[in-house]
Amino acid sequence: MSGGAFKASMAGRTRSEAGMTREADTPPLAIGDIREAAARIAPYVRVTPVLASAALDERAGAYLHFKCEHLQHGGAFKYRGASHAVWSLDDGTAARGVVTHSSGNHGRALALAAAARGIPAHVVIPEGAVQTKLAAIEAAGAHVVRCAPTQEAREAQTERVRTRTGARLVHPYADTRVIAGQGTVALELLRAVPALDLLVVPVGGGGLAAGCAVAAAGWRPGLRVIGIEPAGADDTARSLKAGRRITEGRPDTLCDGLRATVGAPNLALMQRHGVEVLTVTDAQTVEAMRLLWSELRQVVEPSSAVVLAAVLAYPERFAGCKVGLVLTGGNVDLDALPFN
Amino acid sequence: MSGGAFKASMAGRTRSEAGMTREADTPPLAIGDIREAAARIAPYVRVTPVLASAALDERAGAYLHFKCEHLQHGGAFKYRGASHAVWSLDDGTAARGVVTHSSGNHGRALALAAAARGIPAHVVIPEGAVQTKLAAIEAAGAHVVRCAPTQEAREAQTERVRTRTGARLVHPYADTRVIAGQGTVALELLRAVPALDLLVVPVGGGGLAAGCAVAAAGWRPGLRVIGIEPAGADDTARSLKAGRRITEGRPDTLCDGLRATVGAPNLALMQRHGVEVLTVTDAQTVEAMRLLWSELRQVVEPSSAVVLAAVLAYPERFAGCKVGLVLTGGNVDLDALPFN
């Protein structure tokens, strides 16, 4: 066990004693799993660029390195986790297809990953999803099933499809293969910018945050991961504070990719590795999104912009640091921009 | 003399006989000059990413490789030529500063390059320039002088500033050092994607087109450069057809970066290397700009989008080809988008 893993493990145990998720419930993921995932998906995923902007650095008072996962296949980091899940299946299981529920980007990613392997994909999509994301899922060749916009309806409808088709469920985030796949973002970013002080990622269900936390802990002890939630969907921040997974509350945010409730394994991994979660308002997010468009010249969706919003909202936390920020997706409707 | 240079030279001579610019007027630029420029500016310029999109490839029926010069310092390829001009000056000359006229991107680039060397920059800007570009030039520390929006007024005002200050004129395009600097874009793109069939670039004054033509001719005989002009500013297309530089005509196009009249050395180099120019309508450009935003997820200005507009407007010219396209700039006013 490396020193970093040991420290992380001890930290997890201390928190357990304070009433948090039991260590036994935490998936035994380590950086080796992330490296294996990276090797498995390497033939399919893009190595995305890392961009910087002198104007944004000046405004933030920090050195910002943006990992451009909105330039990943399907326009989101989700293709990593979906690819890892799809290519981990044995041939017999894979032939029966995959199924998931998703407000958009994971559904599109799973549809594309399934198409790459030549197997069927079924995607359950709640009413209210962004129209361009829905159209893209259908264009990728998935079977689309609609449902009510609640967590319960999503899960119930998915279970019905799974039972009917025999397809394997690929949960958008509460799945260790998906988590390991998402963690490959951090590996790639750290290879490009090894000396990061902090890694800042959006938090929806926690797949990216958990995967990055595992990768960062194995990369260098002391490298912190900070998760960012919209103030209107802050279940992870509240869960970490309460020491238990809080599933109540109705999300109210512009960030359509961050409305999911944090997963149990995701929360456990975030606890083990000491991930902290900060929140930002939608107004701060829209202002940050505009800055990313005008200064970094990247078309990103609101869910991506929370990371810059946080760096600007909590300057004391980032001043002078070398910060990695993951831009998670770029699937926006140009006819419905929040700043025009 | 390589076979390619020989063929190009013969081609130039044949055209001379048909009444085009005399070979003697053509600057003796060759790929060695472009390589020297690349070495000189390497400490200052960014190696910009090359992006692709499966959706755009499918739509175009070709393999498109977008060189992202809108991610260059100052948000445009212009920083390359400006840096080469500024860093080519001896210390005594440099100390008196530099002066230019520019509708925006070259002015900003020269302001930034002068600031990097710690020397003064004066920029003459015609009325009607994009507001964000003007603000950026001032922010970079240049002295801004306004003038009427005609080629004559720009040149007269620039001459007045030059005489008053002793600053060295760095013309936005009719300058061999600037041309050599812009040609480094092609070198970088060809290093990333060596087997390109075609290189497609926007044409305003012709600095980029001329530099890329020189680089391409030296890279591999037969590698063609195609320049793209807005139909409302097609002086280069008309000049190539007429066999002489046509300076009459009032530009009428949304593409604020492509309103300049082609320079004499620029036209001569384009003739020597057999550059062809195609035109696109502003409507085609706006549609292409929207596609670059939604599919490539890049914020580019209209002047950049003409390259994709042309590939879509002339499919028979590009079908099945490996095409390099230079996205030249990303300085847009988000409050005045042409497609909202």
Image: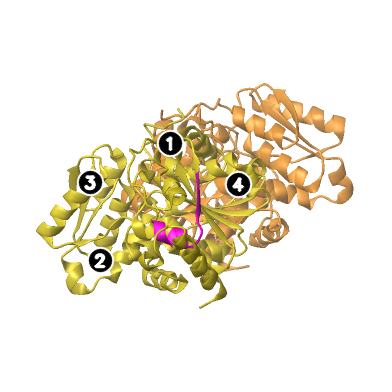
Chain colours: A yellow, B orange
Q: Quadrant of the C terminus of chain B?
A: top left
Q: Is residue B77 visible?
A: yes
Region in magenta? A267-278
Q: Position of residue A86 (x, y in %)?
A: 28, 65
Image height of B97 relative to A72, above or below = above
Q: Quadrant of the N terminus of chain B?
A: bottom right
- Which comes before the other along the chain, label 3 or label 2? 2
**Cβ–Cβ below 8 Å for labels 3 and 4?**
no
Marks 3 and 2, how far apart in space? 30 Å
Mark 3 crowdedness (10 Å alpha carbons): few <14, some 14-19, many ≥20: few
- Residue A316 found in image quarter: top right
**Cβ–Cβ below 8 Å for labels 4 and 1?**
no
Near-viewer residue (B24 or A252) = A252
Q: Disc 4 on helix, strand or loop?
A: loop
The residue drawn where x is 54% and y is 69% is A7
Marks 2 and 4, how far apart in space? 40 Å
The amino acid beneath tag 2 is: Arg
> Which labelled disc corresponds to residue A117?
2
Chain for numbered disc 1:
B
Q: Disc 1 on helix, strand or loop?
A: helix
Image height of B24 relative to A285, above or below = below
The amino acid beneath tag 3 is: Glu
Q: Which residue is mark 1?
A: B285
Q: Residue furthest left?
A: A164
Marks 3 and 4, how far apart in space? 51 Å
**Cβ–Cβ below 8 Å for labels 2 and 4?**
no
The amino acid beneath tag 4 is: Phe
- Residue A312 found in image quarter: top right
Chain for numbered disc 3:
A
> Which labelled disc corresponds to residue A152?
3
Mark 4 crowdedness (10 Å alpha carbons): few <14, some 14-19, many ≥20: many
